[in-house]
Image: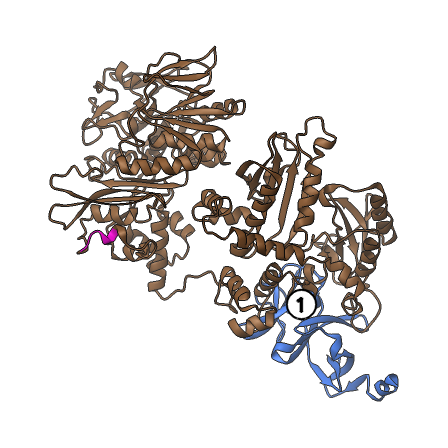
Amino acid sequence: MEQLNELKIATTVETDNHTWFRAARVEDFPANGGACVKYGDQQIAVFNFTRRNEWYACQNLCPHKMQMALSRGMIGSQEGEPKVACPFHKKTFSLRNGQCLNAEEQNITVYPVRIENGFVYIGVAKP
Amino acid sequence: MKRVVVVGNGMVGYKFCEKLRNRTSDHELIIYGEEPRPAYDRVHLSSYFSGKTADDLLMAPASWYQENNVTLFTGELVTEIDRKHKTIRTHTGKTDHYDYLVLATGSSAFVPSIEGAERDGVFVYRTIEDLNQIMSYGKKIKKAAVMGGGLLGLEAAKALIDLGLETHVVEFAQRLMPRQLDDAGAAILAYKLSQLGIAINTGKSTSKIEGNGKLEALYFTDGTVLPVEMLVISAGIRPRDEVAKSCGLNVHARGGVIVDDSLRTSDENIFAIGEVAVHNNMVYGLVAPGYDMAECVVREIVGETPKLFTGYDMSTKLKLIGVDVGSFGDVFGDTPGSIPIAFQDKRNGVYKRINISADGKYLLGGILVGDAAQYNLFHQMVVNKMPLPAQPESLIIGTPGKAAEGAGVKSLPGTAQICSCENVCKDDLVTQITEKGVKTIQELKKNTKACTGCGGCTPMVNDILKITLESMGFKVKKNLCEHFDYTRQELYDIIRVKGIKDYEALLNSHGKGDGCEVCKPAVASLLASIWNELISEQDTIQDTNDRFLANIQRGGTYSVVPRIAGGEITPAKLMAIGRIAEKYNLYTKITGGQRIDMFGARVDQLPDIWQELIAEGFESGHAYGKALRTVKSCVGSTWCRFGVQDSVSFAIFVEDRYKGLRAPHKLKGAVSGCIRECAEAQSKDFGIIATEKGWNLYVCGNGGSHPQHAKLLVSDVDTDTCVKLIDRFLMFYIRTADPLTRTATWLNKMEGGLEYLRDVIVNDSLGIGEDLEKEMQGLIDNYQCEWKKVVETPELRARFRHFVNDESADETLSFVDMRGQKCPPDWNTKTTR
């Protein structure tokens, strides 16, 4: 029965600029925390920022030491800017624009997130 | 180019070089020192016993002399001066020529001529070599005495206490510190010192130092006898004027080279500064006047506006074995008509006396014992002739702490001298802050050199920094981060008093914004320390190690460390670890804390690995947490032929007691079964060493980048007392330390230091001992193994996966082989996938 319901909801949705893929259920993501999503061979960190009632997604790879770790980082804010801190060396990145906030590291890629029917969709830019 | 030769490389000789080189590089500068090492800080000699090394005490490293073009000869004693040809000769035959000669030969310890003073076990307290001898002799004995109850004598007594010896002070006068204190002040000091275990014997004149070869007892003229095995003589100083005398310079009958107001001796090309100089019939046995003399001579030699030395204010403030003592200005009220006002509190060990002028307008001088917080203020009031308030008694009988010292600093004139060693006035400091943008005490020290001499002005400099910054609109507070305007200690109280159980609630009621990677784990640690509920219930405020209950390693895999209390493990359990590590292909290594670390586990493997470990009887080792790690032990009396107590059993008991205890930083302990200290307990946050009579408890040691030996808190306590004191100590640390502060740093920053800590923990001076024990018992009762809970709870277990939408593992993980085991590749060469 449950499976039938899920089938009715599309796993990918195409819009002008993005391919929106269905990542997981809302409840699969911890409150005020993140989890990693697999999309092809990409790893994307998705954050359920319940305190702000916002969702964010970014690359899972921390550019500092090239570690697949950002989804395990703590999230928070710096003067209002939502951010994630890499668990390895606490480099922090803006979840809005991917900029590194406390060091001279490369920017990270961020992705738009949509919630529909209890599912989390992530928008990947079309080539 | 003039050639300046300095004889004597002590504090004053060094300071002369520093001051000259600050002015000019035109003169050749050569300095001869008799000791094998460059000048060191004699004022803080006793810190050598509490862990400082000889290098720590150096005024400047040998390289400083090179860099500043100062030729330094160590181990060369100047024995001859040929004034006619302006040459000197050393004991090794080296000769040198001078245009100006500066004698800074200092002084030696005065040894009274007492029968038996040559016996083994009699020492003086003057050089690092003396200290080394005292230390090595002190190891063989139990009971020692210091002859001399003055400044230096009491310093020496502290050193003996640090060596763990039963310590006596023998003073000829009827009271301690007769030159600085009156009878009432000295009585309070004696009382405080006796509480710390130092026996005070005043009015004792030693007639004989008795013993068969080595020292056994002191005989006094009143017929009494004090059996001791070591004697440290600190009965005054003797200026080192031998070389001056032999070349015909005028010397004083009681010793010392006579100088005029320019510090010139009877030879116009020869100066004398520091403790060797006699100015106006006075020898100045403090470092500050010596520095002042150096300044005068430097100006004279480089031809600046001359500065005359016209005597020096002998006010002093120091901390003697944890007791503050200050005396300033006209100490004994010798000024005609002066009126003393005194306050005496035996219960708290405080004595304050001020002498005011006959007309009641000015402060002339006074004495402070037990609480010298107002010393700087009073001293400056005397020096600057500041008017007294209408009720001068309010200065000393106000509510303690209420008459904030800070307020006093505010009213000081800009010209008030704050640091007397380096002659830094208030304006110098304020300018640094207002114009040079200085914001920390470290920068302030670096730029002005204030606090770098005796360190006595540090509180005042701190106050000036704080007040000046505040007047500029800066807030000076150690807030946790931008989300909480509270310190960790304040948050600790808030959480406890308000019964707050989760981070969000605290952020809502006392914070702002959305939190961050600083406040989240700090609050998580506080919540765990206060309630000891499972941290997995609030996993996203934890650092990754606490969130996944394992240590993240290079490559993003985790390591697993089961608890092996006291390092004791059965062969069966060893094999279980081997089997599990092999099954999951984990790299294994023995840790420094006597347990086994298994590296390279994927996050999704962690619950499976732990399920097997728990089935074999293991539980979490909390290697991932700011929590108790291990209590290391040596094998102890059960097996070891030297052991005096069963260190393994005690270590296991203690480790089991505190396992899972969350703290501001990690905690390590150790128990050694005898004095050989194989468990290295003195490098731990708490270390226990067995004695014949019980246990010695050491606290606040640290390995790591700034190793620090633990300090002895109590000796020879029984097992129950030892545990009770550790309860209190750990709980007090958890309550009061800043985030991520190890116990060593916590103690270093603690006002009052070890003595204060001992007062709180052992003497229960704050009356919180029972509370601390109760809190600890609550935490111990609440302990559960975090991993057991995760393994048994499917929802918690479900969090341990790499992808939330895919069962597969992270395929970017890769390993290389190293000596037959797997390792992550070097991340500095790893390329993006």
- Residue B394 part of the magenta segment: yes
Q: Looking at the picture, tell me which residue is in the foreground, B495 or A18.
A: B495
Residue B686 vs B118, above or below: the answer is below
Residue topped by disc 1: B538
Residue B550, compared with residue B269, is above or below; it is: below
Up/down of B221 relative to B150, above or below: above
Please determine whether, in this image, residue B504 is positioned above or below residue B391. Answer: below
**Which residue is pictured at 29% across the width and 20% down the height?**
B241
Does B504 lie within the magenta span?
A: no
Coloring applied to the structure: by chain
Secondary element type, mark 1: helix
Amino acid carrying label 1: it is: Gln
Q: Position of residue B254 (x, y in %)?
A: 24, 19
Chain B: colour as depicted: brown
- Is residue B716 toward the left or the right of residue A24 in the image? left
Residue located 34% across and 64% down the image: B472
Front-lying residue, B297 or A1:
A1
Palette colour of chain A? blue
Q: Which residues are magenta?
A: B391-395
Residue B718 place in picture, x, y as percent: 60, 38
